Structures are given as C-alpha cells and as structure tokens.
Image (cartoon, coloured by chain):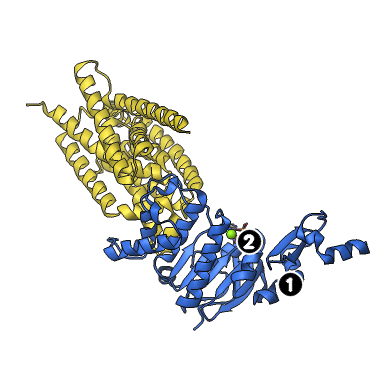
Amino acid sequence: MLPSFVLYALIASVLVSFVAGTAGVFAVLRGVSFLIAGAAHAALGGATIALILATQTGIPFLPPIVGALLMALAMALATGYAGGRGITARMETAISVFFALSLCLAVAAISLVPSELMSQVWGFLLGDILLLTEQDVLILTVATLVVISLISIFFKEFTYICFDMEGAAAFGMRVHLYNYLLLSLIATSTVIATKAIGAIVVYAMMTAPAATALLHAKSIERAIILATALSLLYLCTSLLISLTLVNIAPGALAGVLAAVVYLISLTIKRARRRIRE
Amino acid sequence: MGIVVVKDLTVEYEGVIALEDVSLEVSEPSFTVVLGPNGAGKSTLLKTLIGFIRPVRGIVRVLGIDPTKEPYRVRKLVGYLPQREFIERDIPIKVRDVILFGLLARRPPPRVATVRDLEKVREVLKIVGLEELADKRFDELSGGQQQRVLIARALVSDPKLLLLDEPLSATDVKTQVSILELLRELVDERNVSVIMVTHDVSVAVEYSDYVALLNRRLLAFGKPGDVLTPSNLVKAYGEGLRMFLTKEGRVMFIADQHICDFCEYCRSREWRRRRGAT
Ligand SMILES: Nc1ncnc2c1ncn2[C@@H]1O[C@H](COP(=O)(O)OP(=O)(O)OP(=O)(O)O)[C@@H](O)[C@H]1O
Ligand SMILES: [Mg+2]
C-alpha cells in the first residue's frame, strides 16, 4: 500500500494534468496564456490575504484556497472586461497591470504574515504536492470536475470565440458571457494547479504541454488529450525522481521537462518543415 | 416592410464622427454595393446594421427589427461576413467545422449538428467550389480559399439578408466572378438581399442594382449609372483620379497625370483630344 501522501500526490498529478490539458490549450488558443501567470500570482496574494485575515482578525471561514480563487477570478473578470470585444492586445495590457498589482499585493501581504505561518505561503509559491491533506484533495477534485464539465459542455462555444469572436457575435452568440466564463475557468484551473505545483511553476506547466500539443495535433480535442497525457507524464516522472533519486521540488522539475520538450518539438517541427520545403 | 431602413444615421467613435446623417432604404430583394475610400465608414455601416455599434442619432431597421434594441434577433437572421481582421489563423479547426459554426452558433446550446446540417455544409462548400477540402484544416488553406470558406459560412443558414464586408479580398479573378454570379443568382432566384462593401467599382457597375457611395456622409445612392458619375467620384475619392470605361465596359481608375502609349485610356480618343488641347 502506498503512503497516503504519495497517493494524494498521484491524484493531484492527474487532476493538474486534466486542467493543464484543457484550460491550457484554450488559454493558448484564446491568446491569454499570460493570464495563467497573472492568475497564479493573484492566487498567491489572495491566499496570503486570506491567511492573514483568518489568523489576525478571526474571520472564521476563509481557507487560503478560497482567497486564492476569489483573487484569481477577479483577475479573469478584469481581463475580460478590459479586453472588450476580443482584442488580444488590450487583454495583454490588462493582464500585465493586474499581474503587477497582484504581485505587489502578494508581497505586501507576505510581509505581514507571522513567521510561524510562512510555510503555508511557501506552499503556494513552490507548491506542496507532497504535503496535501485529504481536504485539499477533495477541494481539488471537485474544482477539477467543475472545470472539465463546463469546458466539455461549452466546447463549441469556446472554440468559436477563440477562432472568431466577431463572427460568433455576429451570429447572435452571447460572446461576452462565454468569454468571461472561459477566462474564469482558466483562472480556476490555474488556482488548482498552483495549489499542487506552486505559483512559479504553474505557468510553464499549463502552457508548455498545451503549446507542444498544438504543434502536432490536428484538432482541438486531440490537442487536449495530448497535452493532458504530456502533463501527466512530466508530473509522474518528476514525482518518481523526487521520491527516489533527489529531493527536488517535483512541480519545478515537471515545469523544466515541459519547457524542454516544447523546445525540442518546436525544433523538430521547424526542421521537418524545412526539409519538406 | 423595408429590408433595410436607415434614417438620419449618425455614428461616432469616442466623439469622432464616422457616419453622418446617412439615410437609405432597400425595400425589395436586391444587390447593393457600398463604395467609398478607406475610412469612409463602410464597415461601420454594416456593424451598425447588426447592432455591434449603437448610433448616436437616427433610426435603423433590419428586416423590420431594431438592431439597437434586439441585436440577437437580427443577428440570427442575417448572414454577416466581417472584414478580414480578427480571425485567428492558428487554430486547428476543420473547414467543415468552420461552416457548421455558421449554423450552430445561431442555435441555443447544446449545439449539435444533424445529418441535415452536414448535407447543408456539403451544399455550400460545393457552391464555393471547395467540396474536397471539407476535412482540411482551415489554417492550412490559402488566403483566398479561407475567404471562400467564410463566404460559405455566411450562406449556410440561408439568410434572407447578406451583409458582406469586402468578401472579394484575397480571391482570384475566377473566384470573384463565381462569387458575384452566385450572389446575383441568390438575389434573382431566391429573393435574398445583398449589401456588399467593395473597393472594386467595376463590380458595382456589372453586378449591382444599387450603389451607395459613402465618405462619412452618403454622397449618392441609386442605380449604378446615376451614382458613378465623375463628379460623385471626385466627391468621394478627391481630385487626381480619372474614371473611364474600357471597351469591355469595365470601369477603371487612373491617376490624373498618367500618360503612356500603351493603356486603353491613353489610346482613347478623349485623351488624345485633351493632349492636343494642352
Ligand atoms: N473601433 C474604432 N474606434 C475608433 N475609431 C474607429 C473604430 N473603427 C473605425 N473607426 C474610425 O471610423 C472611421 C470609419 O471606419 P470604417 O472601418 O467604417 O471605414 P471603412 O470604410 O470600412 O474603411 P476600409 O475601406 O479601410 O475598410 C475611420 O476613420 C476609423 O478610423
Ligand atoms: Mg472596412
């Protein structure tokens, strides 16, 4: 029988792979992959603020992950609002501003955190996939199920707004609604992944497998399947290495693997194209 | 009931006027071409018709519906082709799915394609001459082929009104002719109305029933022969351009100072006479 922390880490790897595969692919297609970095740092700030509120003021029911989720969602909605009718450049600017803001908030909040709680902050920054509790796993599972089902239900809508937002609006689709929903789901996925692998690494883990998959896949469905499989492979490999060989942060290792494989497959793809031409 | 009614329409972008006091009416199924220089407000006019932009003044009715009040109703009935700007090219989506988009986006979720829908997709692909490409990725097509797919997407829901913003851009001459003939046929045989933005004056002369000549204001609206007069064209495009009809009846523009020994214009009698006069 596996020790429970290993079991939880494996379950979390599966969950993170699913959100990294689906939300990651849509984030790349929608041109908002930077939102992942922003939402991760918003999550860090949100979690820290929740931590301070809960311990200093005694507000009873605000677990750090809820604080993280709230801040990340606020960031997603602000991004959608600033982007208006799907203009990527404007969304980029909005994301940058909120990224900077949430980073400052996070730093300010962290400076207020009493030293005995710092380990929890470090957990969000670097990920604590090997320290998850039963309650954490439960929350992550529910959140992942919500994200995956909503993305499957609105798969066509999300595809359409990624492909041609103006056309979708012109055919009578409520594009703003779907845009906000998609951005919120990307933010939620980011929080899920941040809890497990940390705010710093989540950007690599959610964009690199998706970008790799999109280099090769012939359809969005296949890209999602491939990205999910790649993420799972990276995370399991890293877990294995960190449990048996060197005591290294598994999330970070997975992020490095993801980025390296992306670079290699990009090079291969370019080389192949050159040969064909 | 008018198909499109526009009265005293004024549209601004953040205080800058893009359209001013435009009034026009399309009352029977017909082919209307909108002409005008860059920045004239042509795209703005179409966007106002489907309720993307709220006018600051004036009345707009499309198929009897007010697009400022019920944009979603208008949009489900109208086939709109945006000017090529915002389509993301790098998305792995098949040609068939791009066209299904035109059907399914108009329905409430769940947007499931039926056998009839797939038949319809095949039908419009045939019309634009791309039936073998149904399974290809959209981003692997040439620019002109992509444009044809988007025209098919605008046609697939059998709309009674088509609003097409520069549909001929990036297409070759043969494709242009086949698209224009298709549009003409839709108007003549299936009572469809077309409002099309183009920069090609000869298209207006050869295919349209009405021409709207726009440069912020509506400079002229009516039959092509009445609208496309030299003085109107000067009003729209400014001095420095001349218009002439080739032997085949095509309208061409030419720079005012242009002189050569080869082109039809320079060889035409009128030009010789002018040259002799100076
Ligand atoms: N979103 C916008 N915000 C601000 N100004 C705009 C916007 N869209 C268009 N304009 C301005 O409104 C005017 C009309 O633009 P419009 O796109 O309707 O011109 P057009 O006739 O379609 O030109 P083109 O032939 O280049 O397509 C232009 O001066 C343009 O700069
Ligand atoms: Mg235009």
Residue at disc 1, secondary structure: loop
> Horizontal and vertical percent for residue A245?
22, 15
Tell me the shade of chain A. yellow
Q: CA distance from mark 2 to mark 1?
A: 16 Å
The image quarter containing residue B232 is bottom right
Residue name at image x 30 percent, y 54 percent: A154
Task: Indicate the chain coloured blue by its letter.
Answer: B
Q: Tell which of B83 and A199 is nearer to you.
A: B83
Q: Earlier in the sequence, mark 2 or mark 1?
A: 2
Identify residue type, mark 1.
Thr
Residue name at image x 12 percent, y 29 percent: A4
> Horizontal and vertical percent for residue A78?
42, 49
Which of the chains bears the disc numbered 1? B
Residue name at image x 69 percent, y 68 percent: B249
Which residue position is annotated with label 2? Answer: B199
**Does ligand 1 reach within 8 Å of label 2's beta carbon?**
yes
- Horizontal side of residue A109 vs A85, given as left or right: left
> Horizontal and vertical percent for residue A224?
30, 42
| Dot 1 crowding, Cα within 10 Å, few <14, some 14–19, many 20+ | few
